[in-house]
Amino acid sequence: MSIAPGSLQLENVSFAIGERTLVRDVSLTVAPGEMIGLIGPNGAGKSSLLRTIYRTNRPSSGRVTVNGENIWQRPASWVARHVGAVLQDMPAEFPLTVRDVIAMGRSAHKRLLEADSTHDRALIAAAIDLLQLRPLETRTFRTLSGGERQRTLVARALVQQPAVLVLDEPTNHLDIHHQLQLLRFVRSLGITVVAALHDLNLAAMFCDRIMMLHQGEMIATGTPEAVLTEENLADIFRIEATLVRNPRTNTIWVMPA
Amino acid sequence: MNESRPLPAPTDQQRLLVVLRSTPGSPASVPRAPFAGSRVAGLPYGLAMVLLAGILLILGVAGLMLGSVHVPAPVAVGVLINWLLGGEVIPATWRAVYDTIIIETRIPRVILAGVVGATLGASGMTIQAIVRNPLAGPSILGVSNGAATGAVIVMRWGLIGLGAFTLYTSAFAGALVTLVIVFWVARAGGRMTPTRLVLAGIAMSSVLSALTSLLVLTSPDPQLAARVLFWTLGGFGSAQWKLLPLPTIALVIGLGLMLVQARRLNLLMAGDESATALGLDVNRFRQAMFVLTAALIGVVVAVSGVIGFVGLIVPHIVRFLVGADHRRALPAVALMGASFTIGADLFARTVIAPIELPVGIITALVGGPFFIWLLRRDARSNGGTP
């Protein structure tokens, strides 16, 4: 048996804190194996929307379903077995080793007091090898570079065996080489991915579809070509841009002026 | 390692991905050699535990030997073995008074010191996880000061209700009242954040310590200040058999619950949002762990006074020895906490014998400089960022 990529559906999701509405009536259907990029200026509501998927922000209205199940009617551990997330918080206060951090990903699959099985160990070992972390296995997390930290957190999300992977600004603090390496890797996994990205060109290069958010509302969704238009970039990002094609990848390329 | 090395070749990657997507028992989950352990300082876990248990045993026996009356080691061991096995297994060639000293005063004292130390160590480690700050300790929750206030109320007015247990009962009641107030303040808005928990604890501590000072200074009894000071600095001089059951049961239950929750305590170290994404109901778990640790500390402070730095320092040493994973660190921190307080108590009652020092003075004198060293080392290794 193997775990298949899952489907994700946002149905009219809104999220508000008090009077402030951070996400307003967003709907999106993500097919299994699809990679979706979430773009928008600072404060557009990208992170707030992603938080409704990994069960941190409870939508004030609307539903979030994974494989047809409403995640807010399921326990936190069920969600953790179906949705993996790579976030900004770094477990750097305590001397946790790379392996300790990755092993956390198995928690939701374990009962209280249940020891790690050979299956758990095989998964952890595979994730370590897959992300080239073997030489760092016993290093403490806080001594790692930005790229190494990010790879460790991706490995942790993978041992959760998620049907859907959520990435919040995964390329933050990475140099261009590691940005490309990480996104290429995530793309190659063949699982369903929703990622908030700042770099419009990387979003265009790696995502099947892009959703553009502004002030919590969905402005456009569709192929990179359909969303990254001169009008949208001018209206939402307030930049004047020329759109060309990357000669090597033939993906759309935003050239600000 | 060269970070720019490419990720695995496509075929390798495919194979690893198949493993990663496999369910238990499927052919793809190839068993691998078991991992040796995730330790930080090069010491295997089993060996570390044996060493810690050995140190505890040695200090325990030393605790039976030393004091106002010196008992030779063979006699101490002989009395201990006879007592443990409930008969005269080893011929009692020693004076009967040794039996009385050891069984009636020293064994309960060593056990109490050990139980208190183990509880403080385990509680300290858990508190550091729930407030996600390795520089926190048991006193940060405010319950220690609550217990002190409860004790001072009894000392000042000499209230007698439950006989000798009035003091302990009142101290524990003070701790519980503080627990409820800190819980209520920290939970404002439905969520208990680490920052709010720490701030609520510190605020309550200040109020209670002011209250304690007020009670002492306005008391007609000139001796009260000294008695309160001695009590708040902690000690095991009052150890007796009938005092042991409550803290011992509290330790067994408390440590057991922490061990059951060890995986979840690990998740707290990942940060609240990540812990949620990893399947933990962070808010409820933090509240439950707060109540558990605060109650344990209340029990411990009620029987032994405020013994500082054990719950702050020992978790650090243990993480250095066996790593931060609570499944391994909690049993180790209990052993080492027990050794630390037994050792400190030993020192406290022998260094200027026959006068006994409060054990809190010893733990602070040892722990304080260590803590400062730790802070400075941390500052260096983090390049100055806290």
Image (cartoon, coloured by chain):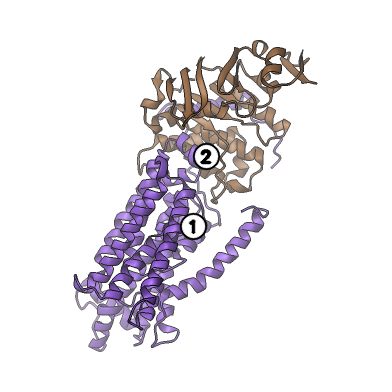
Chain colours: A brown, B purple
User: Can you say whether B328 is above or below B337 in the image?
Assistant: above
Residue that badge 2 annotates: A102
Secondary-structure class at tag 1:
loop
Is residue A1 visible to the viewer in this orientation of the structure? no
Q: Is residue A51 above or below residue A10?
A: below
Residue at the spot 30% in from the left edge and 70% down from the top edge: B153
Callout 2 environment at 10 Å: few (<14), some (14 to 19), or many (20+)?
A: many
Measured as percent of width and height from the top left, residue B116 is found at 36, 66
Chain at numbered mark 2: A
Q: Residue at x 27, y 60 (%)?
A: B249
Horizontally, residue A232 falls left or right of residue A54, namely right
Residue bearing mark 1? B136
Q: Residue, x 70% and y 13% (percent of image)?
A: A231
Please state which amino acid type lies under the numbered disc 2: Ile
Q: Can you see residue B323?
A: yes
Q: Of all residues shown, which one is farthest toward the top?
A: A226
Pick the quarter of the image with the N terminus of chain B.
Answer: top right
Percent from the top left, x then y, of residue B328? 44, 52
Mark 1: amino acid: Ala
